């Protein structure tokens, strides 16, 4: 009896292999004290090699592992965004209490594991890899949220995310099972064929309930209203480097599979789900923007803003056209730049002010710390969609895709959401530039216990407070690069448009 | 050529960040002067009958069909000149007095000039929308960082009868109001291009969209998306809610150019985009627009007549003037539209010195309230004469260019319906009241304690007198503008005129 091993396309699998190797090396390195402290460099190296592999395989369009994965433009572009976001979180985590308390290697291993899950998710073309990737993404994140071991909020957020995330995963799994029942297949293409071949399966309630449950499960992951309640709490409680990673990378990976599953596997049903997704998108835009107005914590505000932005991006799927996918990928790329800039500043400011992320800690920043003020300002203007930033072009792209496919009402919703969002984004800008700094100085002075003799400072001294955080290269460089990207692609967007179209072209077989 | 006009100010603003702080102002002033020089160069080579000239057209975002497309014609050239001129006194005035954080101040001011010029020169609909949105950003920072809170405890001299205003709330209100309009305009612009392309190649070129035409049903809603943006920017009654607070909080040199030029972009947008692109809708809503315009004239004049804060007097008089301009445009005839273009330039030229004079008055009296003022003319004849000329131009005294402009507009309205012209002319009469009241209450009467009647200083004279001189020169030869803009203006309203008939 002979057994033919499936042909392995190692070139196509190279990003996954690189990440897995990196993960193993990071775990092994923790054993040796002499190399332990190089953890961040190992992680950055892993991500750089992964990015290199992705660029090497940039124009690939191949099925891998018997059709369970597919490396194409969509996978490559969104994996690159994930890897960039992960690399930034590694930098932001240097000197963070979460990384130190949880053990540097463990923290980095968890992060790399999550990235591996995301890269698999971006390539998934079968319900099995879809679910495995999603769980591999989520489980390390639950742990990462709780890595700030001495803060109650961090532990609480980890637990909350675990419970809500599990509900989401269970819902999704149930939906997948129903779709399997309706189509008799697990591969995305086979599901599409199965649904079309089955008699009346396209309008069967089994299929439709399955689609609904999958949409709900994914909506939990990308924090689409009304499945968003966990987002502000988890964002606020989690260590900020983790929040930054979650906000950006999870969205990119989950949207990748969202696009692929709905447009490829459920493509024949587009007329059934587009209205449902449009309603979710509109609700998200309203809930996220209105919710953000009342926040005083920057991280909570960014959480609500993420809900609204997820609504904008979901609108790209609603169109079920290539232009919609392009616009979504463009917006995701823009979203990475805008959020990295904002979170890097939040991290730096937290370390200077004893881990407060209240908006009032930004008072007077424009006058005293321009290296933090400018990236934050540009991030906020970009999130608000003002020119000359990439946020404006992103909105323009989405609106063009929507109007082109007769979804003008949803385009108007985006415009209205953007108007509401000015209320909170510009509050940040106004605090940075238009509020005097006296109070923040007083507040900083009362917290700056490190300057006191140890016997007086006592237990209050926080070893992680870093009064020079605004001059640390690993915090300032990501912020400045993100700012430069947000401005550059706002003025010369064509390279990013090409990037986005590379993703859309991968699906040109399935959508118009 | 046009690109260099647009980007020179921003370039000098950025250079200003690099040079030592005390030179920033002079770098900025140099940038503004070079921009004016380049604009004069374009004016010299401009042919009134030549249609769109100095055209630049390169692909900017081919993936989205957006081009970097610039051009100038008889409608835009005088507004470009106005912009290039107006920024010089604003920068000069601040340069001679010094400001806090000068490098950032001039960067923002010059970024404002770049985006305003961009809006006047853009021939691609999306590029226009982009510059239109961009304009508000530097002014948000200018008003927010260098503005001041009014009223309340910190400013007991503030404005009795007006509530306290904080810079933050005023600027937020301004930007939210303005962007409500312009975001809808973004949707409208994209919809216009998509509908006009009708499955063909998507382009945002204004001329192509006009040539392709829009179906009547779509015109009606797209019209309001554009009109909302333009009416807020002007501002027109009843969308002027942001104006009083921002005007009171803003720093005066920035406010001078804001009021002089940015408000005109809205009126310009009607002529450039709305009338050619949506003639059926414009015709359908002509009465509504005329009612809004007349309401702006009457409301603005009445408010200017009752307000005691000098900034608000000027602000509401702008509402009234922009009402005249809108009425002229929506008369759909040559006389009205040409008068509107002339009046845009006139009003811009008059408002800049007016706001700078307010700054000087406030230095002499410590207040911007008309109530306790008076007697400033006593030892300052030159100052008084300058202010008198500005006031006379504001009230459109016969022989001023403003008189010609208003005459053309009223003549145009008369051709639509005599009733419009008669009601609008009440505004002319009211203008005489508020302009003279402003002049009298500040300059005549006894000088109260604490005020100082001081002659205009040389540095202020250097800035203001050239502006006043331009106003006077224009009074003698307004036909320069009328003739220069005539062919372009006539062709802008050609389509809508045919529809209306």
Image (spheres, rainbow, N blue to C red):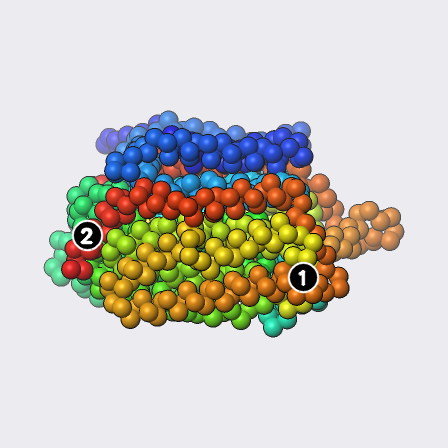
Residues at marks 2 and 1, CA–CA distance in whole angstroms: 53 Å
The residue tagged with tag 1: helix, strand or loop?
loop
The chain letter for the residue carrying disc 1 is: B
- The mark closer to the camera, 2 or 1, is 1
- Would residue B435 be seen by someone viewing this image from the given angle? yes
* Percent of width and height locating residue A467: 72, 44
Q: Quadrant of residue A307?
A: bottom left
At 46% from the left and 64% from the top, the residue drawn is B431
* Percent of width and height locating residue A362: 64, 52
At 42% from the left and 57% from the top, the residue drawn is B398
Q: The C terminus of chain B lies in which quarter of the figure? A: bottom left
Q: Which numbered dot is residue B495?
A: 2
Q: Quadrant of residue B105?
A: top right
* Percent of width and height locating residue B190: 29, 50
Label 2 neighbour load within 10 Å: few <14, some 14-19, many 20+: some
The earlier-in-sequence mark between 2 and 1 is: 1
At 75% from the left and 64% from the top, the residue drawn is B449
At 24% from the left and 64% from the top, the residue drawn is B416
The chain letter for the residue carrying disc 2 is: B
Residue of label 1 = B375
Q: Nearer the viewer, residue B219 or A450?
A: B219
Q: The N terminus of chain B lies in which quarter of the figure? A: top left
Count of numbered labels shown in the rendering: 2
Q: Are marks 2 and 1 in contact (CB under 8 Å)?
A: no
Marks 2 and 1: same chain? yes
């Amino acid at each position: 009896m002979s057994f033919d091993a499936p042909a392995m396309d190692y070139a196509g699998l190279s990003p996954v292999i690189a990440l897995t190797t990196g993960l193993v090396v990071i775990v092994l390195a923790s054993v040796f004290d002499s190399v332990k402290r190089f953890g961040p460099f190992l992680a950055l190296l892993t991500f750089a090699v992964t990015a290199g592999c992705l660029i090497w395989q940039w124009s690939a369009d191949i099925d891998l592992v018997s059709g369970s994965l597919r490396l194409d433009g969509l996978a490559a572009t969104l994996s690159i965004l994930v890897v960039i976001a992960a690399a930034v979180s590694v930098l932001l985590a240097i000197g963070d209490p979460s990384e130190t308390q949880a053990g540097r290697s463990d923290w980095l291993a968890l992060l790399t594991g999550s990235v591996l899950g995301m890269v698999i998710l971006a390539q998934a073309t079968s319900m099995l890899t879809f679910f495995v990737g999603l769980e591999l993404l989520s489980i390390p994140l639950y742990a990462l949220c709780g890595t700030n071991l001495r803060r109650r909020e961090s532990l609480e957020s980890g637990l909350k995310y675990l419970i809500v995330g599990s509900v989401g995963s269970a819902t999704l799994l149930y939906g997948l099972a129903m779709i399997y029942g309706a189509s008799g297949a697990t591969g995305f293409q086979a599901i599409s064929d199965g649904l079309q071949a089955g008699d009346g399966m396209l309008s069967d309630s089994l299929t439709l309930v399955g689609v609904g449950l999958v949409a709900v499960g994914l909506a939990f992951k990308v924090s689409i209203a009304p499945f968003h309640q966990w987002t502000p709490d988890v964002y606020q409680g989690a260590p900020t480097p983790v929040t930054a990673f979650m906000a950006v990378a999870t969205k990119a990976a989950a949207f990748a599979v969202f696009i692929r599953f709905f447009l490829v596997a459920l493509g024949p049903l587009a007329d059934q789900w587009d209205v449902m997704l449009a309603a979710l998108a509109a609700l998200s835009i309203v809930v996220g923007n209105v919710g953000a107005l009342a926040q005083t914590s920057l991280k909570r505000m960014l959480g609500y803003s993420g809900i609204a932005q997820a609504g904008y991006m979901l609108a790209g799927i609603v169109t079920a056209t290539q232009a919609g996918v392009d616009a979504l990928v463009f917006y995701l790329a823009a979203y990475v730049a805008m959020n990295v800039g904002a979170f890097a500043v939040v991290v730096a400011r937290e370390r200077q002010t004893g881990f407060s992320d209240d908006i009032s800690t930004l008072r007077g920043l424009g006058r005293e710390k321009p290296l933090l003020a400018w990236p934050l300002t540009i991030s906020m203007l970009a999130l608000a969609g003002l020119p000359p930033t990439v946020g404006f072009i992103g909105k323009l792209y989405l609106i063009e895709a929507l109007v082109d496919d007769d979804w003008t009402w949803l385009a108007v919703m985006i415009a209205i959401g953007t108007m509401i969002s000015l209320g909170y984004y510009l509050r940040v800008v106004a605090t940075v530039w238009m509020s005097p700094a006296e109070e923040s100085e007083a507040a900083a002075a009362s917290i700056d216990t490190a300057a006191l003799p140890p016997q007086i400072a006592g237990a209050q001294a926080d070893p992680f407070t870093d009064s020079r955080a605004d001059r640390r290269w690993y915090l300032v460089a990501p912020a400045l690069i993100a700012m430069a990207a947000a401005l550059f692609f706002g003025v010369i967007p064509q390279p990013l448009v090409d990037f986005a179209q590379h993703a859309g072209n991968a699906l040109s077989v399935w959508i118009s | 050529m046009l690109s260099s006009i647009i980007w020179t100010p921003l370039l000098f603003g950025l250079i200003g960040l690099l040079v030592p702080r005390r030179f920033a102002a002079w770098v900025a002033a140099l940038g503004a002067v070079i921009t004016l020089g380049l604009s004069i160069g374009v004016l010299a080579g401009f042919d009134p009958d030549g249609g769109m000239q100095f055209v630049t057209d390169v692909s900017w975002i081919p993936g989205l069909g957006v081009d970097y497309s610039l051009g100038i014609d008889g409608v835009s050239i005088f507004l470009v000149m106005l912009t290039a001129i107006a920024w010089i006194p604003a920068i000069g005035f601040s340069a001679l007095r010094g400001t806090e954080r000068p490098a950032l101040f001039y960067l923002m001011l010059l970024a404002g000039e770049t985006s305003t010029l961009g809006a006047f020169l853009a021939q691609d609909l999306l590029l226009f929308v982009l510059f239109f949105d961009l304009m508000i950003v530097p002014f948000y920072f200018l008003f927010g960082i260098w503005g001041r809170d009014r009223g309340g405890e910190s400013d007991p001299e503030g404005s009795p009868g007006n509530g306290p205003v904080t810079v933050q709330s005023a600027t937020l209100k301004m930007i939210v109001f303005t962007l409500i309009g312009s975001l809808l305009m973004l949707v409208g612009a994209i919809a216009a291009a998509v509908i006009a392309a009708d499955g063909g190649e998507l382009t945002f070129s204004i001329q192509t969209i006009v040539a392709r035409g829009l179906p009547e049903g779509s015109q009606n809603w797209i019209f309001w998306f554009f009109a909302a943006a333009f009416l807020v920017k002007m501002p027109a009654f009843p969308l002027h809610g942001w104006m009083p607070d921002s005007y009171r909080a803003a720093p005066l040199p920035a406010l001078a150019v804001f009021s002089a030029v940015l408000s005109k972009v809205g009126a310009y947008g009607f002529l450039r985009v709305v009338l050619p692109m949506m003639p059926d809708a414009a015709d359908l809503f002509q009465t509504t627009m005329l009612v809004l315009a007349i309401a702006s004239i009457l409301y603005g004049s009445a408010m200017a007549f009752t307000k005691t804060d000098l900034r608000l007097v000027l602000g509401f008089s702008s509402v009234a003037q922009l009402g005249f301009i809108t009425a002229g445009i929506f008369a759909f005839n040559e006389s009205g539209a040409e008068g509107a273009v002339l009046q845009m330039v006139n009003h811009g030229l008059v408002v800049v010195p007016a706001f700078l004079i307010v700054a000087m008055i406030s230095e002499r009296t410590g207040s911007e309230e008309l109530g306790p003022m008076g007697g400033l003319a006593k030892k300052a004849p030159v100052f008084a004469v300058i202010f008198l000329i500005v006031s006379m131009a504001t009230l459109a005294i016969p022989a001023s260019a403003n008189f010609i402009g208003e005459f053309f507009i009223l003549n145009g309205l008369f051709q639509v319906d005599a009733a419009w012209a008669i009601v609008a002319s009440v505004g002319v009469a009211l203008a005489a009241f508020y302009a003279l009241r402003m002049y009298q209450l500040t300059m005549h009467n006894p000088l109260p304690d604490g005020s100082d009647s001081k002659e205009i200083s040389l540095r202020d004279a250097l800035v203001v007198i050239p502006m006043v001189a331009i106003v006077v020169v224009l009074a003698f030869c307004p036909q320069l503008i009328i003739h220069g803009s005539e062919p372009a203006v006539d062709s802008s309203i050609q389509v809508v005129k045919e529809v209306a008939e």
